[in-house]
Image: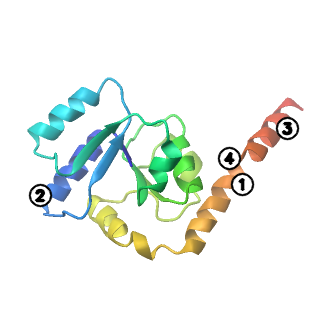
Amino acid sequence: IFMVHIFLINFAKYLRDNDISNIVIDVFGSGNYAETLDDIIYEENLSNIVYPKGRTNNPAGEIRSHDFVCDFTLNHSFGMTYIEGVLNGRKVFCMKNPGSVEVMNDIPNSYIESFDWLVKEINNIDKISLEELQSNYDNILSKYSQEAVCEKFLNFLD
């Protein structure tokens, strides 16, 4: 699952230009750029790689039905996408931005280093151990569970 950004289009072009056909991109979300994305997909001949899905009322179900979560945005206000991805048992790949640094800093092999690196990681997604996914889950849960957030808030009030 991907969030729309120019890097998403560049990654799709990378896949197209390198004849990589085993990776497709489902894009969830809506907004001012949804029509622009459709136009770019058509103009760049990416319709067999990028699939706009619009909004979803079932983010957890969508996350679980995909192999990983990826976010190409460089400007992100908060890392809810990352939290949801990890807590739903998926590997999360992201760019380094304020939200990802806050949430993903202690999760190994999460920051996208290059498109080549990302393709290698995706092609080896089945080799990620349950222990790594559990460790990522525990890490995020310790910082962002309801209990942890409430405790931080109550400590703030004291």
Check disc 3 and report its element: helix, strand or loop. helix
Alpha carbon of mark 4 to alpha carbon of mark 3: how far? Answer: 15 Å
Check disc 1 and report its element: helix, strand or loop. helix
Residue at (29, 64) in percent of width and height: 119
Q: Mark 1 points at which residue?
A: 142
Q: Circle 1: is it few (<14), some (14-19), or many (20+) Cα within 10 Å? A: few
**In the image, what residue type sits under mark 3?**
Asn
Quarter the C terminus occupies: top right
The answer to whether residue 18 is left or right of residue 24 is left
**In the image, what residue type sits under mark 2?**
Asp
Residue at (35, 25) in percent of width and height: 31
Looking at the rendered structure, which numbered label has been put on residue 144?
4
Marked residue nearer the N-terminal end (1 or 2): 2
Q: Position of residue 1 (x, y in %)?
A: 39, 49
Marked residue nearer the N-terminal end (4 or 3): 4
Q: Name the residue under label 2.
A: 17
The answer to whether residue 132 is left or right of residue 148 is left
